[in-house]
Amino acid sequence: MRENIDVIKNSRLFAGIAEESIAAMLNCLSVRCEKFSKNDFIMRDGKHTDSLGMLLSGAALVIREDYMGNRNIIANIAPGEIFAESYVCAEGAPLGVSVTAAKPSSVMFLGARRVLSVCSSACEFHLRIVRNLLSVLAEKNLSFSDKLTHVAYRTIRGKVLSYLHARSQAAGADEFEIPFDRQELADYLFVDRSALSAELGKLRAEGLIDFRKNRFSLKR
């Protein structure tokens, strides 16, 4: 756990908590760590969980698959970010999504009841974690609303430009990186990969965008 202390202390969940207090809090929160290979399921749709996860290293995807096996990427997860928090707050609700490792990853699981209930020893920073968790939930709701805006466009062009514009705004620059490869971007926007690649090529030929792998720039 010590090797991941920088990731943990810089996470949104532990924001405002001194490093020297974190070790004691982790003991209080009944944490456990697991490693996953690329494409492993970290959590499965339809299952129940009594823990929320924090990615310590690697990369992960929150996905939903339909009955035909088509994959829709709901979100990407970077080190320091948490997942399954909505399901542990809605006690008893089965997972409506799966979480998979996009590359070899390590995950810290925190016991939901320990996170959501102030412990008997009344940790000084426990309420801070609860407030941080509420902040993360609100931010993710806004992010999901943004995704609905992107996929609501009828054309692939509309979806792509909406998404790239949002990423540009988030980066505060016309040149920026996206967290997806081409297949993942197609799954995120819920479009065919070949059609997406063709549309990206058209947008570049028209001088509206430029890109190299996952680095894009918008031409004003």
Image (cartoon, grey):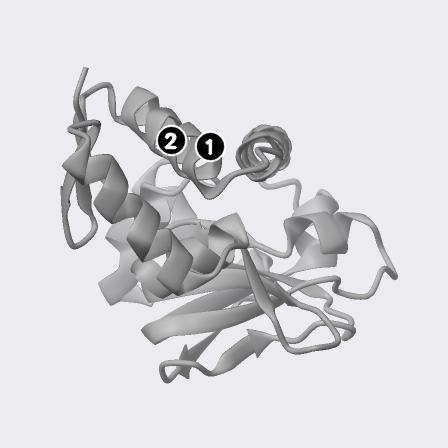
For label 1, the crowd category at 10 Å Cα-Cα, with few meaning under 14, some 14 to 19 and many 20 or more, is few
Residue identifier under label 2: 161
Can you give x and y, in whole percent of width and height, for residue 130 in the image?
Answer: 64, 36
Q: Nearer the viewer, residue 31 or 91?
A: 91
Closer to us: 192 or 44? 192
Q: Residue at x 25, y 36 (%)?
A: 203
* Quarter of the figure with residue 216: top left
Foreground: 58 or 115? 58
Q: Quadrant of the N terminus?
A: bottom left
Residue 83's quadrant in the figure?
bottom right
Residue type (three-letter) at the residue carrying disc 1? Gly
At horizontal 66% and vertical 40% (from top left) the residue drawn is 122
Report the side of 68 relative to 125 (left or right). Answer: right
| Residue to which mark 1 is pinned | 158
Residue at screen point 18% across, 23% down: 174
Q: Is residue 201 visible?
A: yes
Q: Looking at the figure, which quarter contains the C terminus?
A: top left
Q: What is the x, y in percent for residue 28? A: 58, 57
Question: Is 14 placed left or right of 218 in the picture?
Answer: right
Secondary structure beneath dot 1 equals helix
Amino acid type, residue under disc 2 in the picture: Leu
The correct choice, above or below, for 149 with respect to 80 in the image is above
